[in-house]
Amino acid sequence: MTERISTRPNPPRKFWRRVATFGAIVGPGIITANVDNDAGGLTTYSQAGAHFGTSLLWIFLPVAILLLMVQEMVNRMGVVTGQGLSDMIRERFGVKVAFYLMLAVLLTNFGNVMAEFAGIAAASEVLGLPPFVTVPVSALIVWLLVLKGSHKSVEKIFLFACIFYVAYPLTLYILKPDYMELGRAMLTPTVHFETDYLVMVIGIVGTTIAPWMQFYQQAFVAEKGISIQDYAYSKADTIIGSFIVNLVAACIVAVCAITLHRANVRVDQAADAARSLEPLAGRAASYLFAAGLLNASLFAASILPLSTSYTICEALGWESGISKDFTQAPQFYVIYTALIVCGAVVVLIPGVSFIKVMFWSQVINGLLLPVIVVFILLLVNDKRVMGKFVNGKIYNMLCWGAVVLLTLISVTYVAAMIAG
């Protein structure tokens, strides 16, 4: 009788081929989503937790779904058309519409860029580093990264920077919270029709689904040249990014809720939260929070000027992209450089406070978002451009419903501000 020798079969080649393909395509979705947890975002989330406790945690589940749907649409358009969003808006709606829309995006994004360098300065102070050194050095590193790096090298660095967002889940773990209490808060909607509460809701939505994200991800996908055959991998990249960013944001709110809110500590920016954590939760929690802020601010200080350069150049028909050098795309690099230099210089002016700039830039994002989503929906449902890759009926119903809801929240907020 012949003895059979059992051997474990080798993993199928098809599986490893899929892993390799995903590794080559991953980037636009995860990077775009994680950058959204920037200095302005961390300030908004810190204030949400410190001022309102866990009562706003529920909002991250619907926001995660909405973020996924919006980013999936621009991701799909980038793969199918090979064009950026502002390029498509200019072709479909004309130069005048594109110009005014880009002007609004430029002003909002410049406020965000200033917020990033303000975040670098604030985090440096918490960590014992001089801002007058860290801000110029950070600006130079950010500038050289894009000017001298290739598309692939820059993408790898950005992906590596995403790892450091684990600082916030780690901070929450150190605090040993009641996870059942946090779970109930996430699953139980709590709504207040007060102006401050509505402003915070708009701020959270605006910072989590910022208008610059749609322009950047579609431009990133188009420049990367992802084929329609590989769209499933690109979609997975978008799904992962959308849920990671909301998980991190919820952790920040929870950290501030179970420490600062319970101690009745008010904060104006994320750095205040980091400082206030030390007497309440220990130096490790404080330093982790500040280190996360520094990484997030430095990361976003690279992406936001880049996103703005893509957006403006596409809208005006200029050459753009990291894959091109200065002689091929001079306007692209001039805009990128100007945003970095101006953002860093203004932050170093003595006595300038960016607390309101950081928060209100996120609120303006929230007010601008429904307008951007309307343009996206009109473009993604154009069969002449998208062919069979237009939205389905249910998808459209959900997206238009979200636009109506966001618009109602925004109108309610503006009306409350006028009445108050």
Image: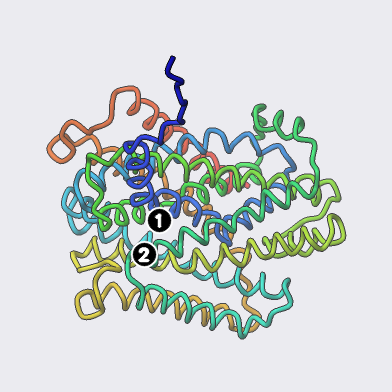
Residue shown at the point (66%, 71%) measured from the top left: 122
Q: Residue 227 at x, y = what percent?
A: 22, 45
Q: On the image, numbered disc 1 is attached to which residue? A: 212
Q: Residue 192 at x, y = what percent?
A: 67, 34
Residue shown at the point (51%, 38%) measured from the top left: 64
Going from N to C along the chain, the mark reached first, 2 or 1, is 1
Is 68 above or below relative to 50? Answer: above
Asked whether, in this view, residue 251 is left or right of residue 95, the answer is right
Asked whether the residues under the numbered discs 2 and 1 touch, taking CB atoms below 8 Å apart as contact, a structural biologist would say yes
Q: On the image, numbered disc 2 is attached to which residue? A: 308
Is 174 above or below relative to 139? Answer: above
Q: Furthest residue to the front?
A: 1
Question: How far apart are labels 2 and 1 at the CA level?
Answer: 7 Å
Q: Furthest residue to the top?
A: 1
Asked whether, in this view, residue 399 is left or right of residue 114, the answer is left
> What's under tag 1, amino acid-wise?
Trp
Q: What is the crowding at mark 2: few (fewer than 14 residues within 10 Å), some, or many (at least 20)?
A: many
- SS type, badge 1: helix
> What's under tag 2, amino acid-wise?
Thr
| Front in this rendered view, residue 97 or 373 | 373
Q: Residue 291 at x, y = what percent?
A: 66, 65
Task: Name the quadrant containing residue 184.
Answer: top right
